[in-house]
Image (cartoon, helix red, strand yellow):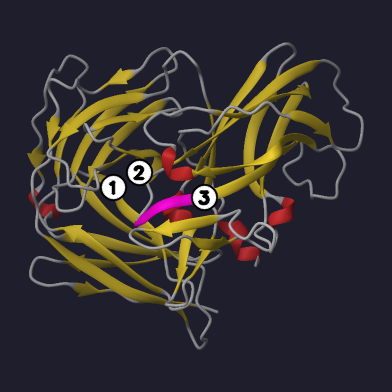
Amino acid sequence: MNRFWTRLRMASAMLALTTLVAACGGGGGSPSVSGQGSLRVALTDAPACGYDEVNVTVVRVDVHRSSEATDTDSGWQSLVLDPPRRVDLLTLTNGVLEELGTTTLPVGTYTQLRLVLAANSPQEPMANSLVPTGQNEVPLQTPSAQQTGLKIPVNLVVEEGEMADVVLDFDACKSVVRAGNSGRYLLKPVLTAIPRVDNGALSVLGHLTALPPSGAAVSLQQDGLVARATVTDAQGRFLLSPVPAGNYDLVITAQGRVTLVMTGVPVSDVGRTTINTSSTPIALTDSDTRSVSGVVSTGGSSDVPDAMVRALQTVNGQTIEWTARPVDADTGVYLFSLPVAAAAFTAYDPAATSYTFTPDAGTAARYTIQARVPGQDSQQAEVDLSSADQTADFVFAP
């Protein structure tokens, strides 16, 4: 079950929970640094794939100054949720910020954070659950190591009289794994911890139109790695917040629509970046779709590897991620439905009131499918969907 932990990674995002004030239950040992500061923690989610609800029950948040500390070591500090809070992650989108809680901490730098979820039990069979679109609620199986928490590397500096603010991004789309036709779903958490500010900075706002029924996914990426993602609301509005300061590619994807990429989008800690207003929305245009599917397997074994598969493109010289999913836990199968029309690009202009996107003809129907297994080199295959659906299988070492 250790492979559940290998999915934990740093990314960026935010859309949080409901206000909770929690008490701090300190771990053993006396702090070596005097003085008190405070820690505030919130939870958020990125877009989900094919689910109406993804529910998790949060018990507490633990922090430690050592990134190598085990659950039995002294020095842990805890923000305890009493009672535990059950939250539908899919309600936390488009800049909705609600707090898990605030607690006092000894000053210092904390480098490990653990999010502890309740375990499903005969008394609480649905502490963690999901509702596949159009189906009934089913339990969501959590890691056997759940009691020690989901480990996230952080760099939280708690200063005397100051508050350290952190948001945990729980990517439901990449964290839920289907197990064949068994009806079982597994939680392999993909988590991110990012700082936040309260002045509207570290955020990007924009508007789209001509959306498909499921809306559009909007993300900020660097070299094909997603830093923050969300989905549009019913009016086509999107808000990506908080996002670490830097320059990003804004990537817009939707089923049956042309992919759009805006390069050079700045994010700063002094103000919000506004792409456009509701009076000048970016229109999405139609595209036919075809599928790429395959199996990720372990050579010479029936064991299914703990694999993540990504669909990538290179648009105007920039690598972007169109989507990423874990493979089926029982079969190793994955399936993507991707647009075949050429992706289009433009550059961010702070003075622009509207944008024109230029098609990149070389991207039409062409994707790189990449498979990743913890502890091994990634594998990839080039696919061309211009005339038919394609298959790309991957075999990893035991």
- Say if mark 2 contacts mark 1, CB within 8 Å: yes
Question: Which one is earlier in the sequence, the residue at label 1 or at label 3?
Answer: 3
Q: How far across and down, in percent of the image, does residue 93 sit?
A: 39, 36
Q: Nearer the viewer, mark 1 or mark 3?
A: 3
Q: In the picture, residue 355 is in which quadrant? A: top left
Label 1 – label 3 distance at C-alpha:
33 Å
Judge whether 216 appears above or below 110 on screen: below
Q: Nearer the viewer, mark 2 or mark 3?
A: 3
**Camera-side residue: 306 or 42?**
42
Please report the bounds of the magenta region as a residue range: 50-54
Q: How far across and down, in percent of the image, does residue 236 sit?
A: 22, 33
Identify which residue is drawn at 62% across, 57% down. Answer: 5
- The verdict on residue 53 being magenta is yes
For the question of whether residue 323 can be seen, the reply is yes
Identify which residue is drawn at 48% across, 84% down. Answer: 299
Label 2 – label 1 distance at C-alpha:
5 Å
Identify which residue is drawn at 11% across, 53% down. Answer: 362
Which quadrant is the N terminus positioned in? bottom right
Is residue 342 left or right of 97 when viewed as pictured? Answer: left
- According to the picture, the residue beneath numbered tag 2 turns out to be 223
Q: How far across and down, in percent of the image, does residue 381 sit?
A: 29, 68
Q: Amino acid at mark 3?
A: Asn
Q: In the picture, residue 352 is in which quadrant? A: top left
- According to the picture, the residue beneath numbered tag 3 turns out to be 55
**Camera-side residue: 161 or 65?**
161
Label 2 – label 3 distance at C-alpha:
31 Å
Under circle 3, the secondary element is: strand
As drawn, the residue found furthest toward the bottom would be: 300
Q: Amino acid at mark 2?
A: Asp
Under circle 1, the secondary element is: strand
Identify which residue is drawn at 53% across, 64% down. Answer: 186
- The verdict on residue 120 being magenta is no
